[in-house]
Amino acid sequence: MRQWCGFICPILLLSGSLLWAEDLPLTHNVPVPDFQNRTESPTPYNFDAPPQGMFRNIVLAEGFEEELGFQRTHEIVPVRPTEQFPAGTKPVFIVFELHQHYQSFQVFGRCYPEQVNGLDGHTVVAEDAMYIALEDQTGYLKLFPAQGSWKPGRYKVEIHAGEQVNDMSLMGTMRFTITASLDSPALTKPH
């Protein structure tokens, strides 16, 4: 009897669970988007706004400083954050802080003129990339004007993350304005 119980008991338990599984209702012919798109988040991700998600904080600034963090890591902090810069040859910095990540990657910045007289909006006028190691929590991009100095107007910077820049690597867009300098011919008063 003992030999049979060792063999029959698992069969009875298994057949009982199979009967229970057959009683579950199945939904047939349900469209795939009903399972993939959650209705809880009514706002779609905006790629034309500053990046979110892996970026804890991202700002435009006139410069950066490197400080020793509480975990004895080097942290990059922005100096004079702003979205308006004077015309000239000084670089524009994008300083960012990241959430914890589990692999290394690169952050890319590609700058395009958005509203600049005499420049095509599809031409890259500045770009930079920074390799982010596993232990890095902060970083920066340094954008120098391609033609030697910034022209007054509005610029946009596409922020990409990954191994290379492509349609899937876009994380968001930053914008800044270059103001005309006081000694520019457009602002000098006639005598």
Image (cartoon, rainbow, N blue to C red):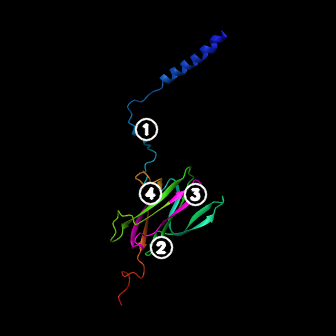
Separation of residues labelled 2 and 3 (CA atoms):
26 Å
Secondary structure under the numbered disc 2 in the rendered image? loop
> Disc 3 designates what residue?
137
- Cβ–Cβ under 8 Å for marks 3 and 1: no
Q: The magenta stretch spans which residues?
A: 130-158
> Could you tell me which secondary element the residue under label 3 belongs to?
loop
Name the residue beneath numbered marker 2. Answer: 90
N-terminal of the pair, mark 3 or mark 1, is 1
Residue 35, numbered label: 1
3D distance between C-alphas at marks 4 and 1 = 27 Å
Residue 33 appears in which quarter of the rendering? Answer: top left
In the image, is residue 105 above or below residue 180?
above
Quote the CA–CA distance across marks 2 and 1.
50 Å
- Is 63 included in the stretch rendered in magenta? no
Q: CA distance from mark 4 to mark 2?
A: 24 Å
Q: Kindly identify the amino acid type of the residue bearing the numbered disc 1.
A: Phe
